[in-house]
Amino acid sequence: MRHMKRLTFIAMLLLAILFVNTSFAEFIVKTIYFQPAGAPALADVQEKISKLSIDSQQLYASEMDRHGFGEKT
């Protein structure tokens, strides 16, 4: 019984440490594009990728709002 309490305490402590570490983490998403031979200029591609990213964020925000969670992206 004492052994079980110790294991439970250690598990709870590890979960608390994990939670604290992830709550201060910063998550960054970067788009990676591999340019094939004969592809259009990179500036044009970057503009298209940027527009797709913004469109995706707007869609996500509107769907979150539509489902009652507020506009979150």
Image (cartoon, grey):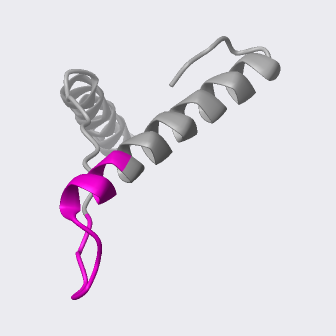
Q: Residue at x 24, y 38 (%)?
A: 28
Q: Give the answer, above or below, for where 54 lies relative to 43.
A: above
Image position, residue 55 (x, y; %): 55, 37
Q: Is residue 63 left or right of residue 32?
A: right
Task: Please identify the residue farthest to the bottom as the structure is shown.
Answer: 37
Q: 38 or 29: nearer the eye?
A: 38
Q: Is residue 3 left or right of residue 70?
A: left
Q: Residue at x 50, y 25 (%)?
A: 73
Q: Which residues are magenta?
A: 33-47
Q: 11 or 35: nearer the eye?
A: 35
**Residue 39 part of the magenta-drawn span:** yes
Q: 69 or 7: nearer the eye?
A: 69
Quadrant in which the N terminus is drawn: top left
Image position, residue 64 (x, y; %): 69, 24
Q: Is residue 8 left or right of residue 61?
A: left
**Residue 31 part of the magenta-drawn span:** no
Q: Residue at x 19, y 29 (%)?
A: 21
Query: Quarter of the image holding residue 6?
Result: top left
Q: Give the answer, above or below, for where 10 lies relative to 46.
A: above
Q: Residue at x 20, y 21 (%)?
A: 24
Image position, residue 15 (x, y; %): 31, 34
Count of marks placed on residues? 0
Query: Quarter of the image holding residue 25?
Result: top left
Which SS type dominates the magenta stretch?
A: loop
Image position, residue 71 (x, y; %): 62, 14
Task: Please identify the residue farthest to the right as the structure is shown.
Answer: 67
